[in-house]
Image (cartoon, grey):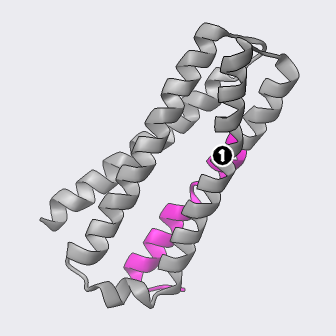
Amino acid sequence: MNTVLVLLHFLAVGALVAVLFAEWCQLRGRLDSGQIGFLLRLDLSYLLLAVLALASGFARATLGDKPWVFYAHHPAFHAKLGFFVLIGLISVVPTLRFFRWRRAGVAEHAEVLATRRWLLAELLLLPLIPLCAVLLARGGW
């Protein structure tokens, strides 16, 4: 059971990173309604993968090899969740902009570049989550 949960968790996190990177790559120049629709589909995938990563991580912490108390009292676990929440909060800004752009039918170059910076912030923070996972697994911190 633990092996399946670990695999599911790793796949969800890997796919989440790939989708976020795809969103970042799409944000170039002025966007038309087709490109905006594609961004919204990517963003929905990102949300679903984040939920899957969170659910599989929670399942690992409660049903996996180590008891919940191991995770509950480890600072690296709390930091990992904190970074996950921070990235989730940052992701609200691009999502709201994608919806606004869909209503407008177009996204102007300056706002696209500003939104790209929000996605870059998410991408730069993401490696801190596996770093916390390594510290947690190795008993560090």
x and y percentages locating residue 105 in the rendered image:
70, 11
Q: In this picture, is 90 found above or below 40?
A: below
Give the residue at x 46% y 87%: 74
x and y percentages locating residue 8 in the rendered image:
26, 52
Q: Amino acid at mark 1?
A: Val
Going by the image, does 70 lie left or right of 105?
left
Going by the image, does 20 lie left or right of 62?
right
Q: Secondary structure at mark 1?
A: helix
The magenta stretch is 119-141
Residue 121 belongs to the span the image colors magenta: yes
Mark 1 crowdedness (10 Å alpha carbons): few <14, some 14-19, many ≥20: few
Magenta region, main secondary structure: helix
x and y percentages locating residue 140 in the rendered image:
49, 85
Going by the image, does 19 lie left or right of 25?
left
Q: Mark 1 = which residue?
A: 92
- The image quarter containing residue 114 is top right
Farthest residue in the front direction? 103
Residue 41 belongs to the span the image colors magenta: no
In terms of depth relative to the viewer, which is nearer, 110 or 21? 110
Can residue 5 be seen?
Answer: yes
In terms of depth relative to the viewer, which is nearer, 84 or 11? 84
In terms of depth relative to the viewer, which is nearer, 97 or 115? 97
